[in-house]
Image (tube, rainbow, N blue to C red):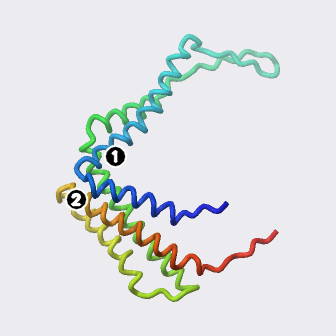
Amino acid sequence: MKINYSFIRAIFALIIGLVLVCTPDESAKYIVMTIGILFLVPGIIVLIGYFASQNNKTTTVFSEEQKAVVVSKRFPIEGLGSALLGLWFIISPAFFANLLIIVLSIILIVAGLQQLYLLSVARQWKKVHYSFYITPLLILGAGLYSLLNPGIIRNTILIIIGIACLVYAFSELSNWFLFMRHKPQTIEKQ
């Protein structure tokens, strides 16, 4: 079964765009808090596992010659770091929401460039009207505008990013329907 990544990208962009447009003031905070939970939970699991096994501070391993080798269990600093970073994300989401705007802006820039590249590749097997380049250029422009103007009210930037995500989703779906069916099929060698 072949996975259609264009369709999956479009669906995720559609969901993110709807969330950002419908609730811009709360969406950044909750996205950051969700990321914090994704760091916190594995860190806590690792720390619980470490402290649960503290009654066995060392493990004896026997080699082929039956010589005892003592292996000490080290403190899981990565688990502690993950838990602390997750807690920081949850406690102060506003700080990380500003970083989120930068990351989302960069994602829009990459998405616009990727669409421009795919349209130029699609020209090899079908004529692509110049109007199809307008949408990726607008997406690219929205990403650049958001990245270069972080001082603007965060809600406005999130709405711009959300609208650009929605436009990207619809553009990706229409490009997929219009051009991918004309892509030549490759014959696999056996």
Q: Which residue is drawn at 57% across and 14% down?
A: 57
Position of 98 compared to 53: left or right?
left
Q: What residue type is labelled 1?
A: Ile
Label whose residue precedes the other's in the sequence (1 or 2) = 1
Q: Which amino acid does label 2 sit on?
A: Pro
Q: In this view, does 20 lie above or below 26?
A: below
Mark identifier at residue 150? 2
Identify the residue at the far top of this view.
55
Rounded to the nearest whole Å, what is the CA distance between mark 1 and mark 2? 18 Å
Q: Identify the residue under disc 1.
A: 31
Q: Which residue is drawn at 18% across and 58% down?
A: 151
Question: How many numbered circles are shown?
Answer: 2
Quarter of the picture containing the C terminus is bottom right
Q: Is residue 187 visible?
A: yes
**Mark 2, residues whose alpha carbon is within 10 Å: few (<14), some, or many (≥20)?**
some
Q: Which residue is drawn at 24% across and 44% down?
A: 94
Residue 99 place in picture, x, y as percent = 30, 51
Please identify the quarter of the rendering in which residue 131 is found: bottom left
Q: Is mark 1 on a helix, strand or loop?
A: helix
